[in-house]
Image (cartoon, rainbow, N blue to C red):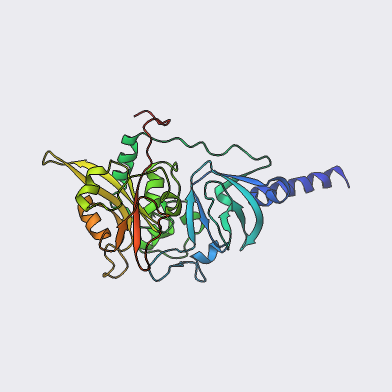
Amino acid sequence: MTLKEVLVVIFAFILVGELNPGLSAKQSGKYAIAILPTPVLCTPDFPGVFGGKDGSTLRLDEQNQIKELESICFPGIVFKIEEIIEKKGRIIYKVTTSDYPYPTNKGYFIDGRFVKIVKIKPPERHKKLPSKLTIIRNLLFAEGSNYLWGGNYKDGIPQMLSFYKPTSSLPVKIQDKWMLKGVDSSGLLYYATNGYTPRNSSSLVSYGNAVRIAGLKIDEIIQKVEPLDIIEWIGHTAIILNLYLSRHKDIECVIESRIDYDKHKEGFQGEVRIRPLKEVLVEIMERRVPVDSYDQKLGKGREKFVIRRWYEQGGKQEEE
């Protein structure tokens, strides 16, 4: 082979790598680092979810949610690549990550354009607990955000509209979902703490320390809680706040993201809302029993909830 032919081959390899950088992982990398907020799906079929057969159909369930969306991993999160899949000219990685350590039958998948491939396992993303003031401010900024199953990036990911470009214009609500704009209940806390807290309610039910509420009435429970305590059961998270209102008294409130605020209206208009704590507890205790530990067994047909105090004043936090 002549020198000219060698140079042509080298140039071709470089060009292929530039056009599809994910291909290099087949030879050189077993790990990936998120360089953008990275959607994690439970399917490798990203084009089917974001576009479908006509290129402009978002795959939604009967509640208008993208049920294939598991979470959105923050920049800096490390993935271990388990498998490389080519899907309609795109490189999709089947991955695992310590930031989302939940069991799966289908596997977790990411689009290669959201990550950088590395040969040696990098250090895990550094987690730092924000100050209480910062967390509360983040929660208040999220008021009015969309409910999004699996969402924890309230402003969404603009790159979704270029990486999976719709072939026609979209209604605003569909475009917001296409960008993964919004949060679910545990995703609201995850967003507000910059990914410090566990991502799912199944972990949050035992996170931190128990607030002893077993056998208490509503007014007694209200006397025991503090700002940022969380009301928990598997499937939902509600965060307690104290809001200083113009009436010059502290009112205990709850901020939460729910899909079913307006369940009787077409489209399940869920969102992040703030309501009085007493109103929320009245609603919860119509169907749930306060317990000190989520491991406590109840009679058949009885549901439960816990309150957890997770914020540690003595922890390492950002300066306010």
Q: Is residue 145 visible?
A: yes
Which of the 4 quarters of the picture holds residue 288? bottom left
Between residues 24 and 72, which one lies in front from this camera angle?
72
Q: Position of residue 140 (x, y in %)?
A: 28, 44
Q: Which residue is located at x 43 percent, y 48 percent?
A: 206
Residue that lies at the very extreme toward the left in this rendered image = 247
Left or right of 46: which side holds 300? left
Left or right of 20: which side holds 205? left
Residue 106 drawn above or below residue 243: below
Q: Position of residue 123 (x, y in %)?
A: 59, 37
Q: Position of residue 77 (x, y in %)?
A: 54, 43
Q: Is residue 20 visible?
A: no
Q: Which residue is located at x 62 percent, y 38 percent?
A: 122
Q: Position of residue 234 (x, y in %)?
A: 41, 57
Residue that lies at the very extreme toward the right in this rendered image = 1
Image quadrant occupied by the C terminus: top left
Q: Which residue is located at x 29 percent, y 70 percent?
A: 266
Between residues 51 and 96, which one lies in front from this camera angle?
96
Between residues 57 and 259, which one lies in front from this camera angle?
259
